[in-house]
Amino acid sequence: METVSFTDLSRKPKAVAAKAAALGRLRVTHRDAPDMVLTTAAHAERAEENLTTASRLFLALMKQDEGARSLLLALPEVFPWVRHLDGEEVREFTVELLDALSDAAELGALEAVHRAGDCSHQCRP
């Protein structure tokens, strides 16, 4: 993702907005605050629609034996730490992750997915 400084944004807002519109999104760095992302509404809406589609697809797969099995087999590629969990814990994590994806997609609760995939509260010592 390309970046501009907050100073650039404040000094040349039209140029920065045009760049963001052309790229779809643009990181705005700020020396004294967290970075921000400037994007178009259309780009943000497409990202939300993609998340909703993926979430609904995963939930539909979990309702089928083969789909659920495929998701469980794929988990270690995305979350390598699940290899340290027993079968029931992997199933619990999968349900938690899919619930979090659904919450993010349907309710805008984006931090839920990050928390669900964070090994610090999942992995055993």
Image (tube, helix red, strand yellow):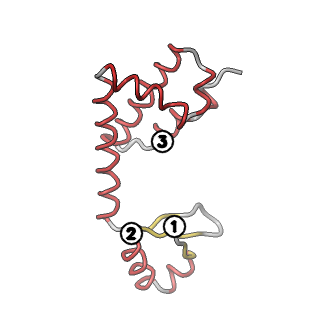
Q: Earlier in the sequence, mark 2 or mark 1?
A: 1
- Pair 2/3: label in front: 2
How far apart in space, not on screen, are marks 3 and 1 (Cα)? 21 Å
Above or below, 15 relative to 115: below
Q: Which mark is residue 24?
A: 2
- Mark 1 falls on what kind of element? loop
Q: Which mark is residue 1?
A: 1
Q: What residue is rendered at 71% in x and 21% in y?
A: 125
- Pair 3/1: label in front: 1
Kind of residue at disc 1:
Met
Above or below, 115 relative to 19: above
Front one among 96 and 65: 65
Above or below, 50 relative to 34: above
Q: What residue is rendered at 38% in x and 69% in y?
A: 24
**Left or right for 110, reference 60:** right
Q: What residue is rendered at 45% in x and 80% in y?
A: 16
Q: What residue is rendered at 50% in x and 79% in y?
A: 9
How far apart in space, not on screen, are marks 2 and 1 (Cα)? 10 Å
Q: Which mark is residue 111?
A: 3
Q: Residues within 10 Å of mark 3 (few under 14, many from 20)?
A: few
**Left or right for 94, reference 123:** left
